[in-house]
Amino acid sequence: MVRTLDTVPGMARTRRCAYCDAPLDGELGAAARYCSRSHRQRAYEARQDDIPRQLTRRIRSLERQLASFERILEKVADTSPACAAAVTDALREETLAAFARGAAAARQRGPTIPRT
Ligand SMILES: [Zn+2]
């Protein structure tokens, strides 16, 4: 839980709706975060709408990391023929392992209907 001034002991202030920032009715329970059911629902929908953007950011971040690892491997491979051979061997092992995982996953999914 994120600590705000409202949750720090001795710093009690008017609690506010997490969606519209309106002051929360004092009759709402201590756990209430929204002024109304509709604002709880709108906040939920806003979080759902945000998922594609979060995934896009995550994919871009992983792509940058991958490019960085590729540059590291290329630099290591460039240092000597022995390193180049070791990098090539490691890449071959990883590729074969990934292929085996993909084949195992395909077997688990079951036979596919052949196309005509
Ligand atoms: Zn509200």
Image (tube, grey):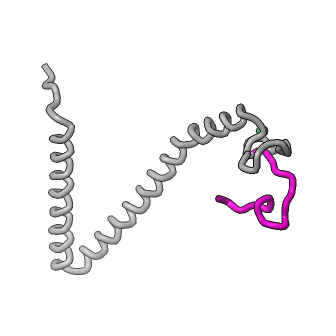
Q: Position of residue 73 (x, y in %)?
A: 29, 70
Residue 25 as seen in the image, left or right of residue 34: right
Q: Position of residue 36 (x, y in %)?
A: 75, 35
Q: Nearer the viewer, residue 100 or 26?
A: 26
Residue 96's place in the image compared with 116, above or below, is: below
Q: Residue at x 21, y 37 (%)?
A: 109
Q: Is residue 39 magenta?
A: no
The answer to which quarter of the image holds residue 9 is bottom right
Quadrant (top left, top right, bottom left, bottom right) of the C terminus: top left
How many marks the image carries: the answer is 0
Q: Position of residue 41 (x, y in %)?
A: 66, 34
Residue 30's place in the image compared with 39, above or below, is: below
Residue 55 as seen in the image, left or right of residue 17: left
Q: Residue at x 51, y 51 (%)?
A: 57
The answer to which quarter of the image holds residue 84 is bottom left
Q: Position of residue 88 (x, y in %)?
A: 17, 67
Q: Residue at x 38, y 61 (%)?
A: 67
Residue 42's place in the image compared with 61, above or below, is: above
Residue 56 as seen in the image, left or right of residue 80: right
Q: Is residue 4 magenta?
A: yes
Q: Main secondary structure of the magenta part?
A: loop
Q: Residue at x 82, y 44 (%)?
A: 24
Quadrant (top left, top right, bottom left, bottom right) of the N terminus: bottom right
Quarter of the image where ligand 1 sits: top right
For the view shown, which residue lies furthest in the top direction? Answer: 116
Query: What's the magenta region?
Result: 1-17
